[in-house]
Image (cartoon, coloured by chain):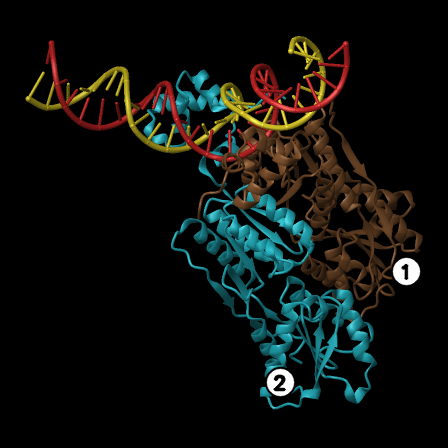
Chain colours: A cyan, B brown, C yellow, D red
Amino acid sequence: MARAHSVKDVAARAGVSLGTVSNVLNRPDRVSPKTRARVEQAMQDLGFVRNESARQLRAGHSRTLAYVLLDARNPFFTDVAEGAERAAEAAGLRLFLCHSDNRASREGDYLAHLVEQRVQGILVTPVDPQASVLDDVRRNGTPLVIVDRTREDDQFCSVAVDDELGGRLAVEHLVEQGHTRVAFIGGPDTIGQVRDRLEGARRAWKEAGLPDDQLTVVPTDGLTVVEGRSAGERLMGLAKRRRPSAAFCANDLLALGLLQQLSTSGLAVPGDLAIVGYDDIEYASAAAVPLTSVRQPRQELGRRAAELVLDEADNPAHVHEQLVFLPELVARRSTLG
Amino acid sequence: MARAHSVKDVAARAGVSLGTVSNVLNRPDRVSPKTRARVEQAMQDLGFVRNESARQLRAGHSRTLAYVLLDARNPFFTDVAEGAERAAEAAGLRLFLCHSDNRASREGDYLAHLVEQRVQGILVTPVDPQASVLDDVRRNGTPLVIVDRTREDDQFCSVAVDDELGGRLAVEHLVEQGHTRVAFIGGPDTIGQVRDRLEGARRAWKEAGLPDDQLTVVPTDGLTVVEGRSAGERLMGLAKRRRPSAAFCANDLLALGLLQQLSTSGLAVPGDLAIVGYDDIEYASAAAVPLTSVRQPRQELGRRAAELVLDEADNPAHVHEQLVFLPELVARRSTLG
DNA sequence: ACCTTTCGTTGAAACCTTTCAATCCGAGGA
DNA sequence: TCCTCGGATTGAAAGGTTTCAACGAAAGGT
């Protein structure tokens, strides 16, 4: 492979100085049309491609954002990424996705690499929002925004959704529909989101004046379809008079699993059991019984995260913000008779 | 933000030349333990972070691979990405994901940017495998491997799966189960994959000695759950004696949609209709009726693609290879009464 | 005490782009 | 004809790392 041509080669071929070539690239208006044409022709002939590394070195930073995400298979994160992508595009930047796959070591590798690359900014949904890797990034001066997680201190910008409110909305909706015995399905409670949603559910339950012991918690080991099915089996195992008439699932995958389990057992939704999910993923509305779910403004989350990170990069007067978005309930057949 | 420190700063603080600092970084064994310790201390104190752009500039290429993918929401692609990620990791490289979202312009932007960045290699599932953007990349000397698509010429390495064989396997399985009236569900036929799977289905059908007109094609406008449901409605609309006893869907999302539609209408799977999907995504085995599906070696695809691109980058004697993997049938309840 | 190795360290050059002060040239005015 | 002004072009410097030939010093051999 012949080595790539540089501005110097272009300059030589066009018979101009390399400063002029650079001007053609960056301030074409300051170059006379005649020379500009000559230089452009030379670029064409040589197949010249700018060397981004050299540009970056000179500029001190790259023209790139990155989003380090937890789980590329979860539509939630890819929607967030899409929002960030749009914002980046609008600012003339590229977005690179890095998949940490829930592993702290991989996350750390990526973050270190991105800092070395001097990317303009990093969005991250961290494995552990308290981890010191995040502080290391900040110390090295790369703007970083935490996505869909929060931290106690205000050392970072963050964007998140009010999960407690989400839990509250779900339960208020069920109460309105007349349910007086409800199950919360979700876990493990090491996940902040799960805790918050349950907390919201409990408060709404209490405020409705319903007795504590009528809100059962069915713990799961994860937020997957398979876990939802197994939770469904446990639910069906309950004595009929103890069985709830509605379930609130900590995410849609659980809800879909539960739904499948019920239809396999010949039970009707919402007749025998009403179901509320969380996230409003695409499959939720396309399910056999369209699923009532709590929707989070996913794209908006990504968009605002990208805007915050850009502000931190460009604006010397930047102050960190912790944005909290409001979820909304989307009622569908799985709770509406 | 104080400007980042450079090797020069470290050298000054440690009282050594900057060549020595570089040695500590790259060939620590050639530096005496005493000076090495001093240099490392200095790095620590200053919070030194290598400048990757400068490294790249010097080295002529980066320490990064990229995968430009069509649809981040499709589990197929994220699994391919995971395979590539593993291979990259093994070679000490990072993998950046770029989401073209099926848009040629975005794909082009990313490719151009990656070439400018001088990434070591690019994997891409292109919107259009014949498009000239791919040739542009090659002309600029960046190794590129086409993933899950093929091209007539042998200008590139590619990895793909034998879709015709996949279609054949699906239909052979249905024939073995005694079905003599089958529907193929899928489209649009601008997608090469859809065409090949249908072609394989037709050949197997013919080889089994079954009459052409008993293999119905139900065209769809895409490969989504919603399309699957609508295809199901059309299928149910057929006169009973014309209705097939089995359906082969061009991918699993269609199959899941079909499955939902049937269970809504109170029809049994496989009793009233047997179903075969394609891709064996995670949801396939977790469906209400576990789905028979054609499995593609997704991670393997990504892994080999990454290996090929690295070979092209490192090995001067590299010759392009077009790998074709073999799919396999995974039989589950949706066809096994 | 002198020569040869070997090991550790050095300094300059190269990678490619961008920027900016300086220079050049031609046109227009006096 | 000379001067001035403006726009076009130039050349050098800077940015941070790596590499490599060259140098210095210490250790080993005679």
**Secondary structure beneath disc 1?**
loop
User: What chain is tagged by disc 2?
Assistant: A
Q: Quadrant of residue A175?
A: bottom right
- Decide: is B207 above or below A287: above
The amino acid marked with disc number 2 is Trp
Q: Residue at x 73, y 51 (%)?
A: B186
Q: Observer-nearest residue: A169 or B37?
A: B37
The amino acid marked with disc number 1 is Leu
Instruction: Quarter of the image for the C terminus of chain A: give it.
Output: bottom right
Q: Position of residue C27 (x, y in %)?
A: 19, 20
- Decide: is B239 above or below B148: below
Give residue A205's mark.
2
Mark 1 surroundings within 10 Å by alpha-carbon count, few (fewer than 14), some (14 through 19), many (20 or more): some
Q: Residue at x 60, y 26 (%)?
A: B139
User: What chain is tagged by disc 1?
Assistant: B
Give residue A263's mark.
none
Marks 1 and 2 sit apart, C-alpha to C-alpha, by: 46 Å
Residue bearing the label numbered 1: B336
Q: Residue at x 45, y 49 (%)?
A: A313
Q: Residue at x 77, y 68 (%)?
A: A227
Q: Is residue C29 left or right of residue B106?
A: left
Q: Observer-nearest residue: A115 or A334?
A: A115
Q: Position of residue A46 (x, y in %)?
A: 52, 21
Mark 2 surroundings within 10 Å by alpha-carbon count, few (fewer than 14), some (14 through 19), many (20 or more): many
Select label 1 or label 2 by which is in front.
2
**Secondary structure beneath disc 2?**
helix
Instruction: Quarter of the image for the N terminus of chain A: give it.
Output: top right
Q: Observer-nearest residue: B313 or B56?
A: B56
Q: Observer-nearest residue: B195 or B45?
A: B45
Q: Is residue B303 visible?
A: yes
